[in-house]
Image (cartoon, helix red, strand yellow):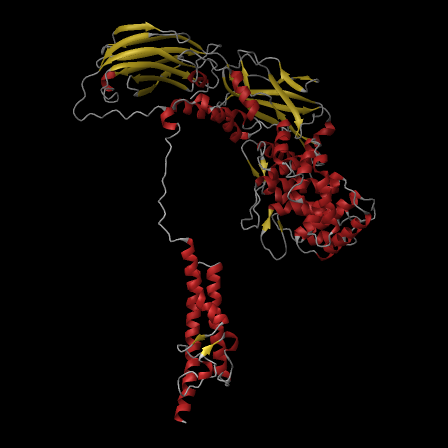
């Protein structure tokens, strides 16, 4: 399906509405930073204009896929779009963020992107920093991020506060055993050293601390979070490298080179597990499945990048770049840029902060080659323009950009051009080729560029990645001629042939019966005279009852032709005679004059349908009726049952509570009282004494005279009373918190327990009663 048809599909009437190539460029400008998903979203914004029918919708989807392939591997450096999104994502609530970690992420993102928002955050953030640093109960992580925030805002922190925090962090380093404890404590000490004049702030046992962190490393280059956890993590490897770099910074003497060498080997092993996309992007993914907090590829890659660059900085660039290919460093930058603009604040921070680390790293600074436009028009004589920047958009060092090859997409033929050097414009910092090579025609191509640094000393400082392949669409006008439509007899003799103009208006009127055929033919060629095969060439016949029939027009070179034999199509046409509107659709993403053209109508006479002939499918309702607002539904709730007056209900409640009130504070007859265990009762007469015929709660006369004196029966009596108390507690839990099933489950265990201990204590009391009777 071609993108060009969309404009014609939404045009007024049936006239031609050519799709201009520049419109695709405008879509690109709004979506080039979003990756494939963003491009699809950019097209969906136009959906309500472009897809009035199923055919238009299919055109839209296929066109989006075609166009996305052209920009999928074009990496763009940080731009103003990132700044706009950062201002939206990092919005403080009532002047503050929810945590110091989130505050630091916002400030760091603004700092890298050059956004001045400190004044809006300063007051609340500094107050939180002062409270955190001044509290002895602050968590280690909060102290770390408080110091990070202070490093950006420069809050007024007293010297004694820094000394107190320093002492606490030093104590934590001495007793630390987990990776995160080392990371926060050692990192906090480095921040304090940078923010104060404490040049003598060192770790006395730096080499021992280095060895303790190194002991958590694994043979594959990953790290464990602590010695008790056998699982290793790629994300933790990045944290460990940062912590080791901080230990080196705080060491008063040089760390044992064997430890440094072992760590460099761990880095090389870690890069052995790096993963790669087809477009040259490299990334790290987390293998730890049961982690407390799963880290995705972006956060994992960012952690490794920060750790790698930090460790390389303190080891004076001693990482062996020959063993760590610069292409992988460039591939990491491509991955971070290839994700577009994240929609999550944490992801945006990880992207921007890690790119800032690559921007200033001592291993290899990536250079990004990008094209402002990947859709070029032959009609408008667009030129090839290339920009080379660092990942944050800074200008590249002096270099030359060459176009070393142009290949037709999907073809392995030789290059259409030989090496051409692009001209550099110092004012716009753009490398340009004045005109497209003459051998380049309408179609999709792969342009191959190469960057050559002028200064040989820059070869080990910058990563260019060798040759860069970028897919490009070259659009242009396609010549449409020799178009005609004819009705043929069965012997292919023409009875009615008419010329048609597929670039103008047509009102062709034809008639045919089931013994005849319909033939449509035309030719397509490019401006260079080459045959052109569009993504779609469809002939559609629509009956006056809205039943549609679509047919693909076949081609042979420049010639396109279709023959419809109505005798073999009577069943497909459901024997529907009458007027058919004839419409031709020709479109392609690179065809600037794609069209959806109404040719005319055909009066078709078909035989009567047999008795068991298939019926035409029911036609869809009008789109407005199908997708428009539905009729409002009025729901009448059931009328509630008539209830007694509120006063009567309250009176009944009072009468219900009256016996309980009398039991608590008054006297009530107790002729039906049941003798409880442990009461002083005359058991021989099996009746209550006259002195306690009435019950008063505060004078019940409860005592323990009949409580078993033997140890075993006494234990069962105590357990029985505790079981009764547990049942009462169970009622309370059922009323306040538990559901019926949980309560019944617990009651089942308690019931069995009460049955056992109750049986034992009652057996004991029965035996005592029998002895008293026999005596």
Residue 313 shows in this picture: yes
Tell me if residue 453 comes above or below residue 743 in the rendering. above
Q: Find residue 364 and report its horizontal and vertical position in percent.
A: 69, 34
Q: Nearer the viewer, residue 653 or 579?
A: 653
**Which one is nearer the viewer's eye here, 292 or 479?**
292
239 or 103: nearer the viewer:
103
Residue 149, compared with residue 424, is above or below; it is: below
Residue 673 pos. (x, y %): 41, 77
**Image coordinates for residue 78, horizontal then vertical, percent:** 64, 29
* Camera-nearest residue between 557 and 571: 571
Q: Indicate left or right for 28 with 524 as reference.
A: right
Image x and y of residue 358, in percent: 67, 35
- Quadrant where the N terminus lies? top left
Q: Quadrant of residue 116?
A: top right
Quarter-wise, where is residue 296 in the image? top right
Q: Is residue 626 above or below residue 273?
A: above
Q: With respect to residue 289, does 582 lie above or below?
A: above
Q: Is residue 257 visible?
A: no
x 69%, y 31%: residue: 115
- Residue 688 relative to residue 22: left or right: left
Quadrant containing the C terminus is bottom left
């Amino acid at each position: 399906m071609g993108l060009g048809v969309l404009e014609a599909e939404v045009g007024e009437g049936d006239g031609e509405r050519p799709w201009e190539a520049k419109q695709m460029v405008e879509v690109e400008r709004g979506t080039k930073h979003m990756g494939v998903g963003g491009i699809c979203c950019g097209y969906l914004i136009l959906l309500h204009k472009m897809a009035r029918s199923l055919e238009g919708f299919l055109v839209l989807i296929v066109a989006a896929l075609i166009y996305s392939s052209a920009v999928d591997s074009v990496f763009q450096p940080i731009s103003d779009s990132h700044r706009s999104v950062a201002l939206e994502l990092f919005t403080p609530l009532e002047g503050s963020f929810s945590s110091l970690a989130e505050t630091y992420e916002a400030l760091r993102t603004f700092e890298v992107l050059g956004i001045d928002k400190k004044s809006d955050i300063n007051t609340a953030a500094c107050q939180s920093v002062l409270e955190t640093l001044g509290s002895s109960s602050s968590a280690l992580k909060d102290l770390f991020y408080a110091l990070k925030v202070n490093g950006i805002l420069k809050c007024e922190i007293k010297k004694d506060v820094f000394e107190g925090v320093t002492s606490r962090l030093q104590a934590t380093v001495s007793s630390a055993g987990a990776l995160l404890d080392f990371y926060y404590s050692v990192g906090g000490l480095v921040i304090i050293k940078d923010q104060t004049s404490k040049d003598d702030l060192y770790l006395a046992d730096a080499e021992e601390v280095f060895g303790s962190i190194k002991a958590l490393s694994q043979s594959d280059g990953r790290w464990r979070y602590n010695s008790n956890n056998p699982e290793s993590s790629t994300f933790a490897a990045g944290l460990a490298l940062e912590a080791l770099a901080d230990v080196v910074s705080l060491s008063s003497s040089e760390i044992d080179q064997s430890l440094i060498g072992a760590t460099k080997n761990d880095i090389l092993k870690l890069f052995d597990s790096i993963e790669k996309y087809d477009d040259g992007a490299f990334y790290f993914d987390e293998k730890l499945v049961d982690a407390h907090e799963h880290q995705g590829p972006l956060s994992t890659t960012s952690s490794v990048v920060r750790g790698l660059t930090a460790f390389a900085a303190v080891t004076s660039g001693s990482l062996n770049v020959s063993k760590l290919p610069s292409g992988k460093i460039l591939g990491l930058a491509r991955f971070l840029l290839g994700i577009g603009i994240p929609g999550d604040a944490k992801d945006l921070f990880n992207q921007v902060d890690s790119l800032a680390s690559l921007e200033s790293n001592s291993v290899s600074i990536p250079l990004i080659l990008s094209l402002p436009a990947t859709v070029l028009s032959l009609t408008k004589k667009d030129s090839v323009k290339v920009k080379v920047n660092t990942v944050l958009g800074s200008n590249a060092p002096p270099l030359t950009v060459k176009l070393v090859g142009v290949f037709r997409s999907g073809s392995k033929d030789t290059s259409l051009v030989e090496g051409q050097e692009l001209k550099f414009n110092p004012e716009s910092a753009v490398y340009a080729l004045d005109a497209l090579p003459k051998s380049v025609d309408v179609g999709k191509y792969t342009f191959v560029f190469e960057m050559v640094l002028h200064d040989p000393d820059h070869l080990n400082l910058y990563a260019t990645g060798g040759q860069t392949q970028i897919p490009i669409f070259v659009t242009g006008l396609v010549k449409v001629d020799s178009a005609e439509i004819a009705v043929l007899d069965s012997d292919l003799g023409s009875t009615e042939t008419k010329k048609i103009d597929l670039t103008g208006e047509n009102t062709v009127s034809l008639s045919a019966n089931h013994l005849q055929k319909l033939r449509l033919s035309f030719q397509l060629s490019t401006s260079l005279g080459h045959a052109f095969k569009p993504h779609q060439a469809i002939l559609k016949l629509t009956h006056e009852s809205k039943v549609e029939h679509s047919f693909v027009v076949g081609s042979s070179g420049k010639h396109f032709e279709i023959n419809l034999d109505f005798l073999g199509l009577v069943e497909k046409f459901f024997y529907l005679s009458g007027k058919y509107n004839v419409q031709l659709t020709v479109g392609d993403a690179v065809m600037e004059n794609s069209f959806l053209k109404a040719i005319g109508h055909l009066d078709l006479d078909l035989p009567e349908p047999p008795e068991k002939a298939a019926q035409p499918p029911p036609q869809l309702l009008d789109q407005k009726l199908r997708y428009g607002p539905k009729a409002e539904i009025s729901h009448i709730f059931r009328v509630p049952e008539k209830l007694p007056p509120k006063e009567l209900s309250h009176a009944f409640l009072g009468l219900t509570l009256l016996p309980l009130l009398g039991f608590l504070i008054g006297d009530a007859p107790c002729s039906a009282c049941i003798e409880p265990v442990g009461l002083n009762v005359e058991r021989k007469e099996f009746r209550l004494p006259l002195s306690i015929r009435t019950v008063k709660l505060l004078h019940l006369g409860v005592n323990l005279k009949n409580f078993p004196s033997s140890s075993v029966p006494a234990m069962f009596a105590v357990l029985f009373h505790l079981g009764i108390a547990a049942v009462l507690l169970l009622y309370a839990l059922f009323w306040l918190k538990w559901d019926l099933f949980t309560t019944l489950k617990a009651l089942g265990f308690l019931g069995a327990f009460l049955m056992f201990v109750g049986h034992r204590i009652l057996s004991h009391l029965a035996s005592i009663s029998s002895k008293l009777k026999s005596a």
